[in-house]
């Protein structure tokens, strides 16, 4: 029981939503977003620095889309349950990596990926959640994952799955002008470890900053809420 409570406390580190926050940008997701929060150098911090406005960051390390446990899921380990109602112009999110890694260890994973998002980008948990966000009037930025820097890492075997997820997410974004997919496949120069932390999985502060800058550019470019195609 004590271990469960500790996990709940760890998971519940997403930023609360308050009526006076003044934020129009909500950020959800897993460790890609949540890493470097302790140093105030996470992705949300970089977005705030670039746009000069607050971002409400509810991302949690270890979060995923398929999360059956009700207590810890509500505390943030379920990405859909990170969402809180608000007057959001933008919802920025990522996810799916932990579902693939924990679900099939980047082995044969086609069925798990298809549960997340179909080949045509129209069906699955991710399109359903993105559609829910769009129905609130917010534009959505869905962020892909970092690739390894050309050296062996614990997720080296996930490269094909990452490429397939990117293809499907790009198809999802092509269906709606208010959905924007940011691929990170070309972010890291070959052999450059400076964008990753020591584990060669998560972003370093430099990596988080560059991801945040790219998200900020999308928000700046598409500042007027478009209607669906």
Image: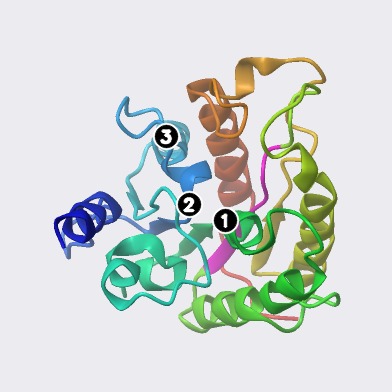
Query: In the picture provided, is 50 more to the left or to the right than 12?
Result: right
Height in image: 223 above or below 82? above
Q: Where is mark 3, residue-wise?
A: 42
Gap between marks 3 and 2 measured at Cα: 12 Å
> In the rendered image, which residue does mark 2 sit on?
30
Q: Residue at x 74, y 67 (%)?
A: 173
Residue in the picture at 16% in, 63% down: 1
Instruction: Estimate the x, y position of residue 35 in percent, counting from the top left.
Output: 43, 36
Residues at circles 3 and 2 in contact by the CB criterion of under 8 Å: no
Q: How far separated are the C-alphas under marks 2 and 1?
A: 8 Å
Horizontal and vertical percent for residue 139? Answer: 55, 67
Q: Which mark is residue 21?
A: none
Nearest to the observer: residue 19 or residue 95: 95
- Say whether residue 13 is visible: yes
Region in magenta = 139-146
58 on left or right of 178: left
Answer with mark 2 or mark 1, whichever residue precedes in sequence: 2
Q: Earlier in the sequence, mark 3 or mark 2?
A: 2
Q: Residues within 10 Å of mark 2 (few under 14, many from 20)?
A: many
22 vs 105, nearest the viewer: 105
Q: Which residue is under mark 1?
A: 98
* Res 95 visible: no
């Amino acid at each position: 029981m004590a271990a469960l409570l500790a996990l709940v406390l760890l998971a519940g580190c997403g930023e609360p939503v308050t009526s006076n926050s003044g934020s129009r940008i909500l950020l959800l997701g897993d460790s890609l977003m949540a890493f470097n929060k302790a140093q105030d150098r996470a992705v949300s911090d970089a977005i705030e620095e670039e746009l000069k406005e607050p971002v409400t960051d509810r991302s949690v390390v270890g979060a995923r889309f398929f999360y059956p446990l009700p207590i810890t899921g509500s505390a943030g380990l379920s990405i859909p349950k990170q969402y809180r109602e608000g007057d959001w112009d933008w919802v920025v999110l990522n996810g799916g990596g932990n579902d693939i890694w924990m679900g099939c260890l980047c082995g044969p994973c086609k069925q798990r990926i298809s549960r997340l998002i179909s080949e045509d980008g129209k069906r699955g948990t991710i399109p359903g959640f993105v559609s829910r966000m769009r129905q609130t009037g917010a534009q959505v930025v869905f962020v892909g994952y970092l690739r390894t820097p050309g050296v062996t890492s614990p997720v080296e075997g996930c490269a094909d799955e990452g490429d397939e997820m990117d293809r499907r997410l790009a198809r999802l974004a092509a269906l709606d002008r208010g959905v924007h997919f940011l691929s990170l496949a070309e972010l890291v120069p070959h052999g450059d470890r400076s964008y990753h932390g020591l584990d060669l999985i998560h972003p370093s502060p430099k990596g988080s900053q560059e991801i945040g800058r790219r998200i900020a550019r999308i928000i700046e470019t598409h500042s007027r809420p478009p209607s669906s195609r």
